[in-house]
Image (cartoon, rainbow, N blue to C red):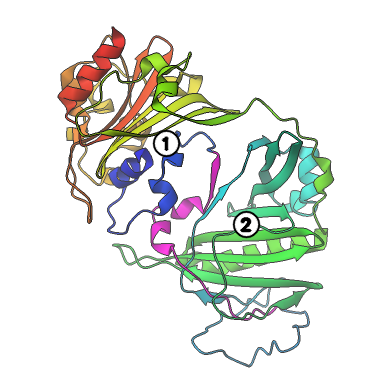
Amino acid sequence: MKAYNKYMDKISVSSILHQKIMSRADNTRTKHRPIMLKRYTAAFACLVVVLLGVFTIPKLLQHNVTPTPGNDPSVSQSGVHTLAPDASNKYTLYFNKADSQAVANIAIPGHFWQELTDEELKAVFPNLTETHSITATANFQSDKRGASLFNIDAHAVSATGLKTYIQSAPGEVVLDYRLDVETKSSNVLGTAVTAGCFETKPNSKGLKNVIYFATFKLSDVAYYVELGGAEAKKEALKNEISEIIGLLIEGGAADLDVFHPVVPELREDRMSLDEAYADIDFGAYLPTEIPRGFVFEDAVRSINQVQNALFVNWTKGMGYITWRVSVMDENDKTRITSVADTKNYDLALYPIPRADSVPEEVREIVDNPIFLIDELTLGVVQARTYETADAGDEPGQRMRFSVLYEDVLVELSVKGASPEVIFDILQQIKK
């Protein structure tokens, strides 16, 4: 629920957030990699909520190659429109305009990851390393028997700054979409490629974005490629994603045997409330009393490569209290503020939508400031409290901030409890 509040603070749209943003899987801080992977184009994070559903991809043609049988470029399917290719690019594809696109939310059992080295990048993306700047993360799944590669998330940046997302995986890529009608693919250098495009609705200024995507398979390695940007740059976007697809195919299937993963300490245990209170590291930092009407929902003790934390959630109708306890790390320190620096936390200074009212240089700290428990006052908690009317939601006071007890950090997100009650809860922990 914390991510929901953060999202609503920064945008003004009427659409409902997609399921996983609403889920407690996102109670981890955004700078951490959660167990639930969320693959979507970052540039459209504020638009993707309206893209839930099914998209259809009709036939695709490749310039300068032979189409598969039945894929006649002169034949048009009902309701299908294709975009004209750019003859200057030997890898140019024809793209179908898709109606909508869903967000992929992937649960990986025993998830851990590692950033690819230069040697590994060359083995996985042999041609791209010569033309693009590439960063990539290998995601692994593990159990008592060991670890295996789940997929690879990569970003390839061109000389002109275009950033393309690439996902590769043994067997199949895991995507949250399905084809609504039978599709026809083109033969691209001997490889069947299915592609499409999606245009967002115009924003308040009448501007639209466009997303191009494609899927194909090389040997037993599957690929998904995605690139988006302003509609005005669509020709450059089409050329770039087409070029990358061609380079990937020319380079051949990724060498996935290059990885030799070692499973780190991992823990993702669901707990009862009693077990959460008994946790030797963080149980003492949970609320001793919960406001009337709230009931325990769940608790998770999580240890992975970037976090060692305890999460507990209580709910009351559409109200919630979300509690995250962890040892403060170096990244957290940038969010510490004194109560005198009201510009860092007083929400009265920043009307919704806060994406417009909060200056970029203080946006992270305003979103979730950290206060020393000895400096925390009721006035500070009240300054973090606000109300907003969301369609289909219940009214209620909301707040989000963090409190530091020596080296232990408590991050909380609340709806439906008063600042006086929350302040009292935090003071009881101090004692």
Q: Position of residue 78 (x, y in %)?
A: 51, 90
In the picture, which quadrant includes the N terminus?
A: top left
Visible residue check, residue 89: no
Visible residue check, residue 212: yes
Work out whether 418 lies above or below 36.
Answer: above
Locate residue 261: give its quadrant. top right
Of the pair 359 and 154, the residue shown nearer to us:
154
Of the pair 105 and 198, the residue shown nearer to us:
105
Q: Residue at x 31, y 59 (%)?
A: 15
The stretch drawn in magenta includes residue 384:
no
Of the pair 353 and 68, the residue shown nearer to us:
68
**CA–CA distance between discs 1 and 2?**
23 Å
Question: In the image, is 173 to the left or to the right of 234?
Answer: right
Report the magenta residues as a range: 35-62
Q: Position of residue 57 (x, y in %)?
A: 57, 75
Q: How many marks?
A: 2
Name the residue carrying label 2. Answer: 174
Verify CB contact (< 8 Å) between mark 1 and mark 2: no
Q: Position of residue 60 (x, y in %)?
A: 65, 78
Q: Secondary structure at mark 2?
A: loop
Name the residue carrying label 1. Answer: 27
Q: Residue at x 36, y 33 (%)?
A: 313
Amino acid marked by disc 2: Val
Q: Secondary structure at mark 1?
A: helix
Work out whether 276 lies above or below 93.
Answer: above
Q: Residue at x 21, y 20 (%)?
A: 423
Locate residue 111: give its quadrant. top right
Amino acid marked by disc 1: Asn
Q: Position of residue 242 (x, y in %)?
A: 66, 67
Q: Say the numbered circle drawn on residue 392.
A: none
Which of marks 2 and 1 precedes in the sequence? Answer: 1
Q: Residue furthest bottom?
A: 74
